Amino acid sequence: PNLVNQIAAGEVIERPASVVKELLENSVDAGAFRIEVTINGGGSELIRISDDGCGMTVDQLPLAVASHATSKLPDENSLFHVNTLGFRGEALASIGSVSQLTIRSRTEEDDCGSEINVRGGVVESPVPCGCPVGTVMEIRNLFFNTPVRHRFLKTAQTERGHIVEAFTRIALANPKIHFVMNSGDKTVHDLPPTTHWSDRIEAFFGSEIADALIPIESDDAEIRINGYACDPSVSRGNNRMQYLFLNGRFIRDRSLQHALTEAYRGLLMVGRHPVCFLRMDMPPELVDVNVHPCKLEVRFTDGGRVYGRLLQTLRYQFLKTNM
Ligand code: ADP
Ligand code: MG
């Protein structure tokens, strides 16, 4: 079964930043108000994520790290027919199969917390421990038992960059949560909770971007768009500062990027890309979830409609602001 988990890990856990993304999403799902990330050595030595969310009971811990996919696989020969869409509930099992994972957790109802250890997929029985309500996840020596993966890790600095980007995406998507990020013994980010999205954007990108934010809002009842497009003066040489969130998740979408380019047509010099922070919310039936869960791409049931709505919303706002 650990082979199965390791193969799943190959799909879900590409690098330390994938671990950080999965764990941050879990902490958000747990209803945390404060989430703190600490990494050492670009995450391959240590990733620690603590939250003050709902926590887990001693009975839930073994289930959290158990693989759900094994039941779908009659034997190891059919591995190549794995439907990679079925990875839900796989993140912790995958992480535990390629690292040393320690979870300490306590719910509000429990007087005492519990700890569980997984090493290269071997799960130990939970033991009692003292800890506050919430969860602490510690991942040490990522890929210690998968040498090929380990060899493909880039420098600590590069891996740290990917982790900061994963952190940025989730912290931008959840401004009401207090996020802290430490690398080694340095605090890289300490982001107090806020109800103003622009505060969180400024905390990451500084006053130059914050001063260039143009509010965007669509009143379409189904496809809601709100956030900011930036003044052309802060455009970039690449499109990496286009932060699009669909129903609370960061996405990358070629077609929506194209809509942004279209909206800025005539406002930007050739080769320049707009900077945007846009949240789109729509009923789930307008989004085709039938894509790999850990990938950033999505498919819309009516892509043209979403494209048109985004383009129109931006154009209308630009006209109003006389751009
Ligand atoms: P998924 O998030 O798809 O359910 P995961 O493998 O990421 O799968 O997590 C497995 C389960 O462990 C979750 O469904 C949740 O019940 C529990 N869990 C994970 N992280 C946390 C956390 N930080 N706080 C509380 N429960 C958690
Ligand atoms: Mg998860």
Image: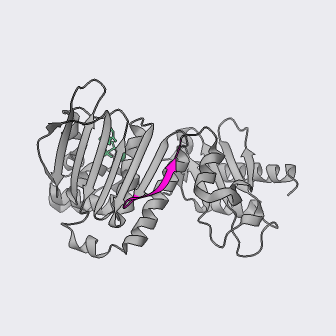
Magenta residues, dominant SS class: strand
Magenta-span inclusion, residue 184:
yes
Q: Position of residue 280 (x, y in %)?
A: 62, 45
Is 300 positioned to the left or the right of 7 in the image? right
Q: Residue at x 29, y 30 (%)?
A: 107
| Placement of the N terminus among the 4 image quadrants | bottom left
For the view shown, which residue lies furthest in the front direction? 185
Q: Magenta segment, which residues? A: 183-192
| Placement of the C terminus among the 4 image quadrants | bottom right
Is 59 positioned to the left or the right of 20 in the image? left
| Residue 190 visible, this angle | yes
| Residue 291 visible, this angle | no
Please identify the quarter of the rendering in which residue 68 is found. top left
Is 247 positioned to the left or the right of 258 in the image? left
Tell which of 212 and 239 is nearer to you: 212
Q: Position of residue 16 (x, y in %)?
A: 35, 62
